[in-house]
Amino acid sequence: MIVGTAGHIDHGKTTLVRALTGVDTDRLPEEKRRGISIELGYAFLDAPQADERIGFIDVPGHERLVHTMLAGATGIDYGLLLVAADDGVMPQTREHLAVLSLLGLSRGAVAVTKVDRSDVERVAAVQDEVAALLDGTSLAGAPVLPVSAQTGAGLAALRELLFDAARSTAQRATEGAAFRLAIDRAFTLAGVGTVVTGTVHAGRVQIGDELAITPSAKGLRARVRSLHAQNHVVTEAHAGQRCAVALVGISKDDIERGQWLTAPHAALETQRLDATLTLWHGEAKPLRSGTPVHVHIGASDVMGTVAVLDRPEAQDALAPGARGRVQIVLNQPIAAWRGDHVVLRDNSASRTLAGGEVLDPFAPTRYRRTPQRLVELAAWSLPHAEARLAALLAAATNGVALRRWACAEGLDTAALPPLPEGSLRTIDATEGDWALGAEHRAMVRAAVLTALQVFHTQRPDELGPDAGRLRRLAAPRLREPLWRALLAALLVQGEVVVRGSFVHLPEHGFRLSAADQRLAQKIAPLLAAAGFEGSWARDLARATNESEALMRTTLARLASGGELHQVVKDLFYPTDCMLKLAALARGVAAEHGGEVTAGTFRDATDLGRKRAIQLLEYFDHVGLLRRVGDVHRLRSDSTVFAGEAV
């Protein structure tokens, strides 16, 4: 269990921790000289059970150091608020209580300290004052214990209270959760190297693991050399522990408080996140959209602005004590995951305003208040990951990016919840893992079949639209990997037929006229002889003594029927030749990491550069390749020009 101390400056936090643990958490010379905590301090107390250890995070109490207090408070399990008997409740007492409450901390206690300096009546009055202060907060009804670090009065009862709390502390999730540690300190240790410390928020880590530092413009990675958890040397650390990680391959100067140490697949950074937020009931004014704030998540503190998404009574504001959904736009990137606690302080960092939880760290820039988006946020608000994913699939008309969703959830990609029955899932080497809910899958299927029926009615002489055109007609916003997977499923089920790159209903046949059949027979040997160079309409007309107009009409009909392929205007290839060219493109991609360039394809086909480019662009169009910058990447799941399949 991790205990976080809180309270006004000079109310005895460090002294009480020393009395409980024997450890002086003031480690800096300036702290020793001034007698106050400036940085986070750490100490540990062994519970009666040999394998349990309570960690203490001793935070500064000075009003100017609340940002440092917040860096330690976001990872605690139990709050210990201190109020000196001779002073009573002071300004930072109230603010630290607000922080603990807005972090959603419901387990804690209050220690009325320095009781040796006050009489019994004064101590009782302070206890009553504290109990009244707790009303209306998440710590309402928490135990209030009188103690003295000097005489030892009440320390035994406080220790027993902490031991009981430690025994009832639920273990944080580790199975399926990606490792995440909020860095609150970084330093260099002689003979060890770079060391970072922080609270492990999720998952587990072992010596030798490779980890990412995020956010980081350099894409920093490092390997774990050694571990200390709860101040013990260990080979593995897990969620809920204070941890020191010695890293290989990174300098201390590359790391700063507010960054995270994470499993590489969970590393993310964002400047726009959606969250659910509660405005502190003691605030005098509503929180309005556009308000500049300090945003605290993990150990980070960055500036940002708030946009209220829920608008009760058409007011663009959140009332004191009210809870609602907001979007937070940040001035610089941070790392944040679904469920992380967020605390807002005012622009001048003089008081704590609000707190809540991150819903979606990948919040959209546009359409953030539409009914569709609010339904998605309702899905993000559900308590369990499996329910959240099912609700998102039901809400997302164009599918869910599963790897991105797992990253936002801080989950290992191998630990994805099972998809609801009837969902469509596909994996694309370029665009990742995607899923489409059963209801939306059925809607797209119906749209495809309707679009084909309309096309056949309006153009009975054509075989059907090509796959790209059909997508534009039926599901223009559906992600392409999902579109290809859906089309392949319809083909397997016999609901559509695919010939070349054209799609049609099974009952729709394609018949050539007698004139077209005659001309097709005449040009067949010429098309075959042209090989990879292809045949131009004017050359075919000249060779057969036919008019160019008639030749173009027949070639167009043959292309619309899937017999030929028009790579550019008036340039045609037979299907057999395109199969060979596609096989060469696949071979080139296999030799070059999935990429095909104009140069490598030119060399494989002995064509000129211009013709190679024209063919590659046609393969992009029909879905065999995908243009990425100056290269064409093979679509790993594409079966275009693989025999007679899609």
Image: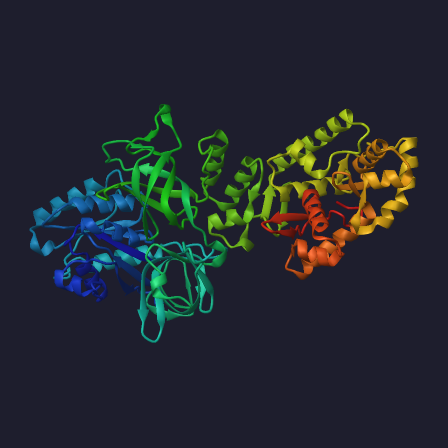
Viewer-nearest residue: 550 or 289: 550
Q: Is residue 447 left or right of residue 202?
A: right
Q: Is residue 6 above or below residue 223?
A: above
Locate residue 333, reporting x and y percent.
39, 49
Q: Is residue 190 above or below residue 415?
A: below
Locate residue 49, reporting x and y percent.
34, 65
Viewer-nearest residue: 131 or 541: 541
Q: Is residue 84 above or below residue 292?
A: below
Q: Could you tell me if residue 495 is visible in this image?
A: no
Q: Is residue 486 left or right of residue 536?
A: left
Quadrant containing the C terminus is top right
Q: Is residue 486 left or right of residue 298?
A: right
Report the residue at 72% width, 54% height from top: 585
Total count of labels: 0
Quarter occupied by residue 287: top left
Viewer-nearest residue: 368 or 511: 511
Locate residue 176, reporting x and y percent.
50, 55
Locate residue 226, reporting x and y percent.
40, 70
